[in-house]
Each structure stands twice: as structure tokens, then as C-alpha cells.
Amino acid sequence: MLIQNPISGQLVFPILECFHIAGFALSIGMTALVDFRLLGLGLRDETPAEIAGSGLWWVLGGLVVAVFSGFLIFSTDPDSYYLNWVFDVKMVCLVLAIVFNYTIHRKVVSPGASPAAGRWVAVASLALWLSVVFGGIFIASFQPPYK
Amino acid sequence: MLLSLAIWVQNLEFFAYLRGSSYTFPTILALHLCAISLFGAMIVATDLRLLGWAFRRSSIAAVVNQLRIPKRIGFLLAATCGFLLFCSKAEDYYYNIFFRIKISLFILVAVHALVFRASVYNKPAELDGPSGAPVRAKLAAGLSLCLWVSILCAGRAIGYVGVHAGEYRHFN
């Protein structure tokens, strides 16, 4: 256990959560700017490639902060996360979202890609990332009773 | 007066249901965070452009003008979810020091808008120049980032005071 449980009154847990939220909000939101553009909303004067290029390092930075703080949050009570099926679902969604983001999403954003494909990829991207957020919240709603 | 209003609100049938619900409350909380993610980044994108740290190939005017309406829609979504969460536990929130801090920070956001809207956000075309945005625009962007990050932290801290931390975290 790297960090004490929050019930013992440690300040570090809420601070980690703030980093976690700020990190994922930055990376998901910057990705969403590209997705909204693929759907014809928001920054319409820019190409999807330009928005993605500008957001590249902010997305990656936010992701690194969110994953690292998330790992520390996990380490406060690993067995309860391990036993929680919502946590498993969240991790699957997270891995899918990251892989999707750096493969199919990246391809569709590049210049010359089909706008029709772009719309479906944008919807899939938004759905994947937001399901990770939902997973994070619902971990607390399904505490394993057998712990 | 405010306290009795808070107690009245949270005893309305819908909010009493919301308070005790296993899934509706966390669903609204998750929507609150989704709205924060999607539209918080629009605030960040605007501010980063003003600071010259991102979207440098687009003009300031393009970024500020195109994100103005989406930002407002996003704020409305996040605020609506937040208002529902507040109403379901209004009495706790009334006493909660971090909720009071968060509301005070929103008042500062309004002050920020009063100070900078006329000279920065409503005149983005005048901010584009070879040497980047003028100091007042960068100041507005920096303060905006600080305010919103503080609001995020205060919002997260609300869940940690008042009731026993462990029990409260279960819902927050």
C-alpha cells in the first residue's frame, strides 16, 4: 500500500482525486474538441488534424497525470478494487479508449480521411471515454459486500 | 432563511428520492463530471490560445468566437447536474465549508467576466498580433485557469467534510 486509506483522515487522497479529475478532464475534453469537429460542431474553421495536433501533448499529459494518480488511488485499497467488477469494466473501457485513440481515431483525423467514417469514429470515441468516467463514479456504488 | 429553504428543497419528493437512490444520484454525478470534462476543456483551450500555448495556427478570434456558445451550453449542463446534486443534500451543503468556498469562487468568476469580458472576450479580433495577445488577455486567461482549477478542487473537497468521510465518500 503506497498511501493510507482516506478514512484515516489523510489529505493525500482528495488531492490525488483532484489531480485525477483535472487530468482526465483535460485529456478527454481535448479529444472531445476533435470529436465535436468531426461531427461538425465547435471549432469548424480548423481541420480535425489541426485540432488534434494542437491538443496532442495536452491529451497525453492529462492522460499520464490521470493514469498515474489513478494508480496511486488504486494502491490505497487494491483488494477492494480488484474485487469490484465495475473497476474491471472501467479498465477494459480505458484500454479500449486509449488503443482506439491512437489507432483508428488518429487515422480518421489525418487529412484526406472520409468525413462519414469520421462521424462514427467521433461517436465511438466520445462513448468510450465517457464510459470510463461513468465507470469511475460507479466503482463507489458497487462496493463488494464480501470484502 | 437560507437554511429553511435548503431543508424545504431537499425534502421535496424528487430530491428525497434522489438522495436515497443507488443509481440515479451517481448517474447525475457522472454526467456532472462528463460535462466538466467536455466543456472544461473548451475553457482551457480558449485560455491556452490566449496564452499562446496551444492552437497557435488558429487566430485568437477564431478560437474564442467558435467556442463561446459551446462553452455556455457546457456550463449550463454541468451547472444543471450540480444544482440537482446540491438540492438532494441541500442542508449538508449549506453547512459545508467547501461548498461555500465553491460558490464564492463562482462569484469571482462573475467578477472576472465583468472585468475582462468587454476588453478581452468580446473583442478577440483586436487581440491577434505578431507578438501574441496583450498582457490583459494573458492575465484574464491565467486567472480563469486558476479559478476553474480551484473550483474543481473545492468541488472534490465537498465530499470530505461534514459526514463521516468513509460513509460520505460512498456517495460522492
Image (cartoon, rainbow, N blue to C red):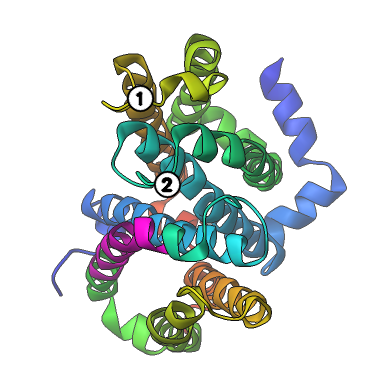
Please give the chain letter of the residue carrying mark 2: B
Residue located beneath label 1 in the image:
B129
Residue A60 magenta-drawn? yes
SS class, disc 1: loop
Circles 1 and 2 on the same chain: yes
* Quadrant housing the N terminus of chain A: bottom left
The image shows residue A31 at horizontal and vertical percentages of 46, 64
Answer above or below: position of B53 versus B106: below
Tag 2: amino acid: Arg
- Which of B106 and A60 lies nearest the eye of the viewer? A60
**Total number of numbered discs in the rendering:** 2
In magenta, the rendered stretch is A52-68
Distance of mark 1 from mark 2, alpha carbons? 39 Å
Q: Is residue B153 above or below residue A117?
A: above
Is A66 displayed left or right of A100 in the figure? left
For the C terminus of chain A, the image quarter is bottom left
- Res. B113 visible in picture: yes
Query: What residue is shown at x 51% (from left), y 45% (from top)?
Result: B42
Judged left or right of residue B20, residue B150 is left
Percent x, y of residue B101: 44, 26
Judge whether residue B60 is colored magenta.
Answer: no
Question: Is residue B161 visible from the viewing direction of this image?
Answer: no
Most foreground residue, A57 or B25:
A57
Q: Residue at x 25, y 64 (%)?
A: A69
Q: Which residue in the structure is indicated by mark 2?
A: B156
